[in-house]
Amino acid sequence: MGPRLYNNVDRYEVRFNETADYATVYPYVMADTVGGDLKEEVYAFSGGLAKPFGRFHLGLNAGFNGKQTYRDRDPRIKSISSDITLSLSAVRELDKYVLGLNLDGRKYNQENGLEFVSELGSPLVYHDAGLGVYNDLLAGTRTDARFGGFGYGVALQLAPRQYKGWTAHVGFRGLNINKELGTIRDYVGEIREQAVEGGIAYLYQQGRQHFIARADVSRVKRQGAEAKFNNQDAQVGIIKISEDIRYSNAYTKFNLRAVYGQTGGFADWFIGIRGNYGDHLEQYADPDRVQSYTYINAGLDLTGRKQLGKVQLAVHLGLSRQQNPDAASDWDNINTASAQYGMLERNFAFLTVSGTGYNGSVRADFPINQNIAGFIQAGAGYDNGPAKRDYQAMLGLRF
Amino acid sequence: MRQLNLFALVLLAGGLFITGCSKDDLNVKKSEVELSLTNPTGLKDVTVSNIVLAFKEVNSGKIDSIKAASLSTVNVNLPEGSYELSLDGDIRYSDDGGTYDAKVRGYQQSVVVKGNSVAVSLNLFLYNPTAQFVLKEIFFTGTVTPQGKTYNGDKYFIIYNNSEDTLYADGLIIAEAGFLTTTKRVYTPDIMDKTFTAGSMVMVPGTGKQYPVLPGKQLVVANNAINHKEFNPNSLDLRTADFELTLLPTINVDNPEVKDLINLSSAMTMHNRGFKSYVLARLGEGITVDQFKADYYYEPTYVNSAGNVSATKNVYKIPNAWIMDAVNLSVAPMFEWILTAPSLDMGWSYCGKVDSDETRYSKVVKRKVLSTNPDGRVVLKDTNNSTNDFEPEAKPSLMP
Amino acid sequence: MQQNERRRLKWNAAFDFATNIDNQRTDPDNGYAATDKYISTYNSYGVQGGVQSTRLKPGLVKSWDVTGSLSYQPAKIDLVQWVQTRSAYILFNAMEAGEHDARYVTPSYAGKMLVDGKPLYAFLKAKTTLGFRTGQLRHKLMLGVESNYSKNFGRGQVYDVDFPVSSTTPVNQRPRTFDSIPGMWNQSFFAQDEISVYVGPHKLTAVGGLRGMMLAGMDSRYAIANKMYVDPRLNLRWKLPLANMGSKQLEVTIGAGYGLHTKMPTLDQLYPAPVFRDIVQLNFFHNNPEFRRANVVTYIMDESNPNLKPARNNKFEVNADFEVDGNRLSVTVFNEDMHTGFTTNSRYMSLSYKKYDPQSVDAANLTSPPQTSDFSYVEKHQLYNYNIAVNGSRLRKQGVEYQFSTKRFKGVNTRFTVNGAWFRSTYNSSLPTHALIGSDYLVNGEVAQLVGIYSDPTGETRQYMNTNLVIDSYLPKLGVTISSSIQTVVFRTQQNTQKSGVPSAYVDAHGVTHPYTKESELDADLKLLKMFYSATEAVVDRVPMSLQANLKMTKEFRKTAAMSLFVNRLFTYGVNYYNKNNVYIKQNTYTTPYFGAEVTFNF
């Protein structure tokens, strides 16, 4: 039986998005100009079994992640989403290395509803198609959307049997999600995403010294196909007449990370550096809108760990700097007085801001009894580019 | 190590392959539209000129406007989609009486453009504006109280004499549509090009010359001709209205000092979100109310979304020839069709940008002013196209 | 527990209490924060107990027990709501019948209402089991009595009738105290004898019994008051001797049964709320508030049906059970018929009222408030249509139910169970119905002037078939129990009786019935009584298959804790189809699974 968790999340001032799991179903979210605070509850559990077969080890793992999102005042969002994953892995031992193959499948569903109870009325509810564009015929009061789709992935991994030497991994994943709206027969939007990733790492350990360096690269490309409809009459309803791929979002990321540390002694300490480079391009056709930017992010961090009796204390400090060398945006055919224009401009400014960030956290791990261990963690961070502050506090039990 | 070298190679190759984002070739399919125009029937030696075509795509809301001097076929390249097509132009024609210059129009909805090429044929119709009684202002949204609750007793119509003669309001009918502009149905029989389907109709009483209206003067027809400020401080005072409607008995308010209109078929409840059209009409020559109800009863059947055949009850058909003015009302995201023949009114007006728009209250649709004569008489704009003739979401003229 | 040599006596008692804590609420969108308030309190008190005696030595009386329970659940809703009228409406709030002057609704005010409910439920049951032999027959006789009582002592909706809170438009309802509804006391007895006898290697069992019930303490004007209705039941089972099938043994049991089941009407059907019908006679809304006058006539109708009888259902079934090596198959075929089912039937009444003419008084030159008698009037009539509960429908049901379960297979420790059913039910009602002409139709300028009488019978036939497959595995080494099920609705059909919609007769506003002829269909007003029915009403509509798969897993942690989680609709599939009108219906839409988890700790 794997990890089980329950999360209760409060999101403040969510605007232009009345759909949960934005990162999975973008850009086809339901939206309105009002928005507000909302609550989320997440339930997740997973489990699996593993069995050796000669020099092979086979494993099967299944997981379920359910989320409920709601808001207690107009616009009253009520969304339930579920994510079921099933993965099969095979590991083969070679002389010094271990080769692993992982196949996984994913089934995603979301029921997304919106309700207004005020006797005065409601604002416009529209369905985003990317970069602030929406279908006029479908806009209005269609508040019943459903998402569903499948994902798949293949990954290959090579790791040393002893915890030192080179490691490498390469993987490929795909995701196809469709959106249904109300009683319309055909899909309103289709998301097709492919991602490729790979990386190598090197581990070195000698006595009390530890060193790890890794490089990863990933490329994700998501395309959205949108349908056009004709409203024939109330009997036949809305019929799809054509479909085009109108939306595309592609980004590439390079990450480098190296950590060196020493254990034993007064305390264990680790010092790390980090470098990230990203290149994003988001486009929409007719009206032609585009948003592209690149960023470079470099960071330095220090971690210290000390065992005090039964309690293990860890302190982490970090510093980072982000720069955006290139940034360009062009919104064709947009009313500059509309709410969507303001949203696009603010969003672009947030994504392309440069700044310096500082963060720190403290964590204490302690055993409770033979089977159960617990931990407490607290942290804070500040990023002066978007003027973002975050705080976290965590309490956990492991059994 | 051998495996590792192979790996590193694959990785590097992959990295080189995917490095660098290139601009995608996203494009939208387009079609060739071959448009042909059909002249109005019964006209000879027709020439059409000064054509202005508007193609409005329903999914994107984009309007492509094309001007053509005179062509019997117009070729245009448009993205695939569903279009609302409207045409305005000049026409010269002759018949037994002589040669005439007039204005011509065309209107068609749900034109599907897809594939390589599409042939679309558009019927033209003559459009002759005549000045008579017109609907000047319609207040149907009601008002909101200071505590945020709705109040709807204060709805009214304003009828205006747009001609230069004195007209008599006796026997004038205000009819509300029997269908909705937000639900398009295929009715059997479909007679919208010749008649208007009316749900509730109210008529001004009188023997013929009892209610004169001078040129440039108006009549206020209120749902309830009372001082609504007693009930809602944000409302208005309608005690001086000229006529009052008789509503359903449980909700009717009767000011004895204001004349009531006669209900012909059912008590009128003005649609509060603006989904119905209104017309001004008179019964044909020599036709009484009982004759009208017997001969002009209309029971259209339609197929609903579950596939069952249903009938619309208690509606009557008013021939277009009896109608002197028409206004279609709808709301942009919900609009599906107009309820009048395009020759009566080709467009529509609105109060509210969405269905149940919370900002629609205390607003009217008001006819625009075309010109003011030297003697002070105001002429209102009436081109039988409410999209252009009316000012949407305007302030009620009766509110201080 | 007491024990002596002859019997063992046990008793038990339980008390439970529940209350709610989250009881204050305001609506952020529709409420007016300055005045609105909503507080709901709920408490539940329950006590139950029982005594049971079991005889240890042989004797006639094998055991007896008495159980009883009492439960009281007072609930209160206290609410204040800002009310705004939508226009100048007349206030309909007279509590007595007759003509009276009425006032206009106050434009805006804070309405207060208290909803007070005090339901009480009491239950008492006494039962004894006797055992004896008559010759070869072994008897097990069970006798018992049962009483059920329920009544609500609450005050119902309490509010000032001059300032109603329920809506912003006039209401034709009045407050009703719950206490005024008589309580319901259902008294029943039962006697059942189980006779078993061995005829050679065959075992025959017959269970016969009677159950009687009556509604006691009712007003004698009701036909069912204090009348005992007796339901006979009989069940026969024949267990065949074990037959040999290779190395295994087959056990076959065949049975048949017949029973009558009585269902008493509900309190709502016996004591419907009195209906108030208000008709506006005069509405004189003068510009001067002092000179306004409104007059209303109120009729109060009692829509109860004292002739209402209970619904009685006949059921006959035949079943067979086969068991071999732990695998079991059981099949049941049944036929039910109910003639006296509850349905509603319409009635109408002609109501007269005085239509006063507001123009008969010179409004512009009034010097003092006018009286209703100052106005002239015309005598008019209106029709009123209402529904009462009657016994008048027939429901027939035929079907087959089956269940097949396998033994638990070794190794995987899994058992498969398949169960399903098919049945067809036919409903029809041949009572004539009445319908008032549409509420917005004006006949001679007035509403509610015609009622149509329709004699076409109403009916529908439905068929339904479903199959479920359940797989459950128990893995003791991991401490895990997994149960997965696939539920399929194989098909559903529905077919209605075709109706013409043409009335057989009509009633005018004075209450006089006239036949509806061919000329009536052409008359400008009478043609509005024709109802429209689609030509495809009588065509069979068939919905094809839809299925869903569910999963439930439980893991035990060494008897201290158990965690279980379930996901319903983990996987769904529906066949999209064209319905009887050739419209494409989509059954295969995306639905999200329904999930939950439960953790139990044992101390």
Image (cartoon, coloured by chain):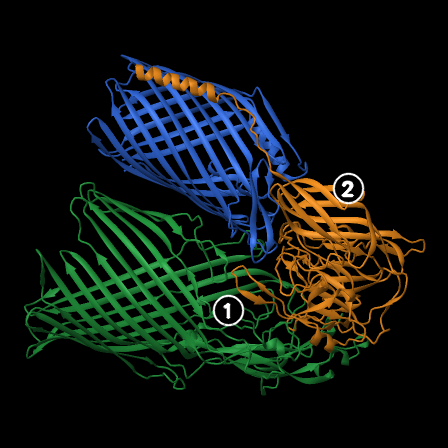
Chain colours: A blue, B orange, C green
Label 1 vs label 2, nearer the camera: 2
Residue at 73% over, 45% down: B54
Disc ID at residue C158: 1
Residue C383's spot in the image, x, y percent? Answer: 59, 81
Query: How dense is the environment of label 1, judged by Cα within 10 Å: few (below 14), some, or many (20 and up)?
Result: some
Q: State the residue position of label 2.
A: B67
- Residue C263 visible in the picture: no
For badge 2, the amino acid type reads Lys
Marked residue chain, label 1: C
The single residue placed furthest to the right in the displayed view is B374
Residue C73's spot in the image, x, y percent? Answer: 37, 65
Location of residue C457 with respect to B176 vertically, above or below: below
Q: Secondary structure at mark 1?
A: strand
Q: Are marks 1 and 2 on the same chain?
A: no
Quarter-of-image position of residue C496: bottom left
Instruction: Kindly report the distance in space between the C-alpha atoms of the residues bearing marks 1 and 2.
Output: 71 Å
Q: Nearer the viewer, residue C405 or A203?
A: C405
